[in-house]
Amino acid sequence: MNAALEEHSDLPPEWSHDATKAKPNALRFEPASGWADRAPPAPRDWIIKDILPAGRVTSMLGNGGLGKTTVAIQAAIHIAVSRSIFGLSVNGGPVVGIFCEDEQEELERRGRAACVAEGIELDTLDRLFVLSRDGQDNLLCTFDREKIVLTPFYCELDAAVAEIKPRLLILDTAADLFGGDFMSTPQVRQFLKVALGGLSVRHGCAVLLLAHPSSSAMNSGDGGGFSTAWNNSVRSRLYLRRPKTEDAEAAKDRRILEVKKANYGPDSASIPLIYDRGCFVPDLMPIEEGSTKPPRSRGGVSTKLGLAVVSFMRRTAPSAAVVPFRDIFEALQKDGLIDRGHYEMTRKPLQRVLKNLVEEGVLRDSTVPRGYRLMSDSPGHEL
């Protein structure tokens, strides 16, 4: 060994000049010319197009109470049944979800609400596995100085993933799972790359980690974690937030799902959402951020009524079947969204809504048979 190197006392013992000690095995490299002898890799695989890459670690951050868990459960259901979500195509498969903040009954409530909203039958969810770990020790790793130590719970999870072979593993939330210093780059990076990344590499599954952003990241709008490693060590990072507006009432049920980092796809994309009947759906009339005006009203269309129409159409005619006007009218009237009274008078608000949704490309009117159908590329409709 070079004499200059031997002067460093912090070198690993196996690097000693002592010939009696085993030498480390050399790393094995393949010349790139070998690529010419095999077929090129398959195109990048996506679970949710452009925001959730297969086989990699993705994080979704958002302040407490904004709906990260609800969005994650919705995504889990859509992936388990291979149905598009928020207008984005899905290449689905089995999903395992570990949720550390809510009891099993609450997870079921949210899952049931999402299925009702999307017209998904509960008995089709045989590829979805959801487990509450509320009130238990959920640390996946701790640290001995700066070296990661995997816990017994990590080994149990690893065995379950090996058995179920999910396409996606959802972990909620980082504060329960990470037993290190949120500001330590080495510790954060080992958690994301060794613990979670190890699950991805060994089992070929994607990991979606839910987490809370730091206060400074929320104030700046970046939505990141504490150490820069929370951003740099994942391949995709999503941020769920409220829209920026001075109209607090209009923003109350609205969210923006932003792509803050995308190593394999376009970044800076955003999906406006609104909370409706227990789940999030695409916001057809999103807030113009930075404006003091309320959400724009398209031709006097009621946001609530417009969302109800699209929600009813998704449940009733997910395959773009034609739904008669009278069926839409009676269903919304039964739900209390249209006043009871003389039909010729009470139908006019709904007619305005339907006309506007047709102009916006959300619906298409049909003459034979007469009625309306969802456009195949309308928000939240299966692609």
Image (cartoon, rainbow, N blue to C red):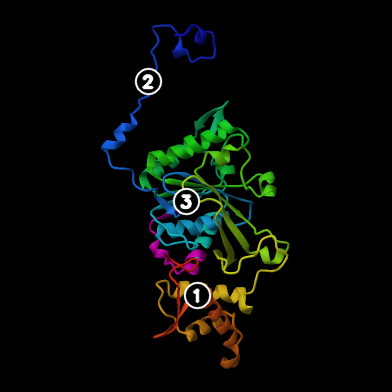
**What residue occupies the far left of the structure in this picture?**
37
Q: Residues within 10 Å of mark 3 (few under 14, many from 20)?
A: many
Q: Residue at x 39, y 48 (%)?
A: 44
Spatial CA distance of label 2 from label 3 is 35 Å
| Picture coordinates of residue 34, whole percent (x, y) | 29, 33
Which quadrant of the figure contains the C terminus? Answer: bottom left
Q: Decide which of 230, 99 is in the foreground and name it.
A: 230
Q: Which residues are magenta?
A: 113-131
- Res 141 visible: no
Residue topped by disc 1: 312
Residue topped by disc 3: 52
Spatial CA distance of label 1 from label 2 is 63 Å
Q: Residue at x 61, y 60 (%)?
A: 255
Q: How many marks?
A: 3
Residue 116 lies, with reference to residue 144, above or below; the image says below
| Picture coordinates of residue 245, whole percent (x, y) | 70, 61
Q: Secondary structure at mark 2?
A: loop
Q: Residues within 10 Å of mark 2 (few under 14, many from 20)?
A: few
Tag in front: 3 or 1: 3
Q: Secondary structure at mark 3?
A: strand
Residue topped by disc 2: 26
Residue contact between numbered discs 1 and 2, judged by CB atoms under 8 Å? no
Instruction: Please state which amino acid type lies under the numbered disc 2.
Output: Ala
